[in-house]
Amino acid sequence: MTMGWLAAHAAVENCYVTTKGRRTGRSHEVEIWFGVIDDTLYLISGNGTTADWYLNSLANPQVTVRIEDEVRTGVARDVTDAVERRTVGELMGTKYPWDGDASIGLTFEMWCFEVPLLAITDWAAL
């Protein structure tokens, strides 16, 4: 299903993602940078595989995304395809040029191309 709502918000700096806690079942919202390609929203886990939002999304892939005044539900999946990962890394590196985060040992290159990446698709309006 084509959802043009993502394209209209691709340049927005942050989105808000709500996941269901994998242990508690409670809703958790995070503010996060994102990228858009076609009808897919991408999220990079700069904290690696230990980020709660990432782990929650793997355990329960049904997530809610809010960008400005738009709210949708979608289904998250871990990105494992090397070509898709590289394409998204290049997109995110262009959208968010920064120097990395030395406090967590994260370089810009690692953030773009090495840490976990989620894709969210199968959108439904709330």
Image (cartoon, helix red, strand yellow):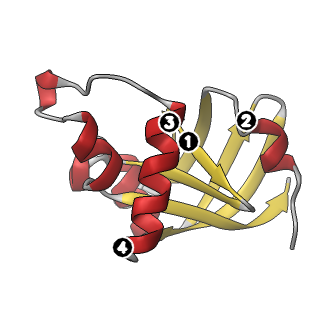
Which image quarter is the N terminus in? bottom right
Q: Are marks 1 and 2 in contact (CB under 8 Å)?
A: yes
**Residue that label 2 marks:** 67
Determine which of the numbered discs, if any, sits on residue 94 in the image.
3
- Give the CA distance from mark 1 to mark 4: 19 Å
Q: Secondary structure at mark 3?
A: helix
Residue at horizontal 40 percent and vertical 77 percent from the top: 81
Residue 96 appears in the picture as rendered: yes
Q: Which residue is mark 4?
A: 82
In the image, residue 71 sits, relative to residue 22, either above or below, namely above
Give the amino acid type for the residue marked by disc 4 in the picture.
Ala
Residue 65: percent from left, percent from top: 67, 46
Nearest to viewer (mark 1 / mark 4)? 4
Q: Choose top left, top right, bottom left or bottom right for residue 122.
A: bottom right
- Depth check, mark 4 against mark 2: the one in front is 4
Q: Residues within 10 Å of mark 2 (few under 14, many from 20)?
A: some
**Image height check: is 71 above or below 67?**
below
